[in-house]
Amino acid sequence: TLHFKIVCALPSAKKQEICCSVPPAYLCRQYLSHNILISRLYIKVIVMAALGRTYYFCMGFRVVVKGKQVGSSEAPILAVAPHSTFFDGIVCIVAGLPSTVSRVENLATPIFGRFVRCLQPVLVSRKDPDSRKNTIQEIDSRAKSGGKWPQVLIFPEGTCTNRSCLITFKQGAFIPGVPVQPVLMRYPNKLVSDCDYGTFLPPHIPTEEEKKTPALFASRVRETMAQALGVPVTDHTYEDCRLMISAGELTLPMEAGLVEFTKISRKLNLKWDNVKKELEGFATMASSCKGGRITIEEFARFLKLPVNPPLEELFALFDRNGDGTIDFREYVIGVTILCRPANTEDVLRMAFQLFDTDEDKRITREEFTSLLRSALGVSDLNMTKLFKEIDADGSGFITFSEFQAFATTHPEYAKLFTTYLELQRYQAIQEARPGDLELSSQTDSGEKQEDSVSDKKDD
């Protein structure tokens, strides 16, 4: 009887093997070891929680909790926001030491790193390209373990903010499609917040649509939390913070990197590395502009062209809000949806043929100068430097491959020439229109006066 009872207490996968071949004395040792291990874990949780509360109490933290925390079976994931400080780790103690999603670097932090390690965290490395996939798989596995793992606590913003709004939530907490309990963090500092409590909101049970679309799930949980906090939401993300840092390194105002990266990357199918390269190009153009915004004069100097109608037309296409300047967000959108689509081989060949007047498949300096002077009003002095940049091998003429290579890194020129052609076509139509109207009026001279007025308005 003793043998049977001990076997039932062990993992089910080992029952048959143990019944057949393991002596009762060994089973007793295993049973005792199993219970001792559980006791040690239980004691560790109690001790760690007590030490954690003491640690924060000594630093002046007094925690007031509102709402009720549910168990892992009802909500396997806790989503905590806003994330604003290193001390937000206090929520782990209040929530009963759940597993956390944490940066690898946090393990090296004195005292706090040891505390994090005891929570069996899901570690994230922003330097490892596979880290995101591995993290999502681990969160999904723990969230769907049926209570074998403790709750997983996640700060879905992915970075610290100033608590004045909620930025875009990352999707890791919402990909498993399990209920998520929102947890609000507030501090009793009158300079930051008038509230002095933390709140467990009711669990958010995802709909079928939300299970299929983690971004929608994350957005609705964020809206619920923002309403409870009384703060707005914004589409900025951690990637915007990285762009801000990069902007600062390029001597631009840090706010130049706030482009709502996630929103424009979804719409335009952009990668972060590509946007970073565009930021470097923007910095080159805006190096002498105060405030990190490009004026039309700076735009013209960068392109080594004078301010003329085609350039003004192109600048207006970039300047989406019509304030007379281009910020980095407008630049990224303009280059992506205006310039790069115009930078096709057909467009480049058409532009090349405009220069190649003698059709010998190469552009001489005289041909290059002639077109720029007549079409865009560029002087010989300005043209010389631009010609040398395109003529990569210094042969004294430009081949199509050189022309194409230059256009790849300077897509603004392709759109500039298509804009010039469109203006030329528009002017030709405008010049032809008066004759057409005169001919039309002669043909329709027998019609009534009011009809003639109506026709002129339509034209």
Image (cartoon, rainbow, N blue to C red):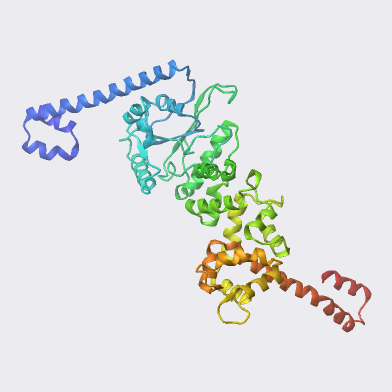
Quarter of the image with the N terminus is top left
Question: In the displayed structure, would residue 319 be above or below residue 344?
Answer: above
Q: Residue at x 58, y 47 (%)?
A: 259
Question: In the displayed structure, would residue 105 be above or below residue 362?
Answer: above
- Please indicate, yes or no, whether residue 225 appears anywhere in the rendered image: yes
Percent across and percent down for residue 3 are: 10, 29
Q: Residue at x 54, y 48 (%)?
A: 261
Tell whether 266 sits left or right of 149. right
Q: Nearer the viewer, residue 40 or 117?
A: 117
Tell whether 368 sits left or right of 105. right
Q: Residue at x 43, y 25 (%)?
A: 90
- Please indicate, yes or no, whether residue 1 appears anywhere in the rendered image: no
Percent across and percent down for residue 186 are: 53, 26
Q: Residue at x 63, y 79 (%)?
A: 357
Choose top left, top right, bottom left or bottom right for residue 429.
Answer: bottom right
Percent across and percent down for residue 203 are: 47, 35
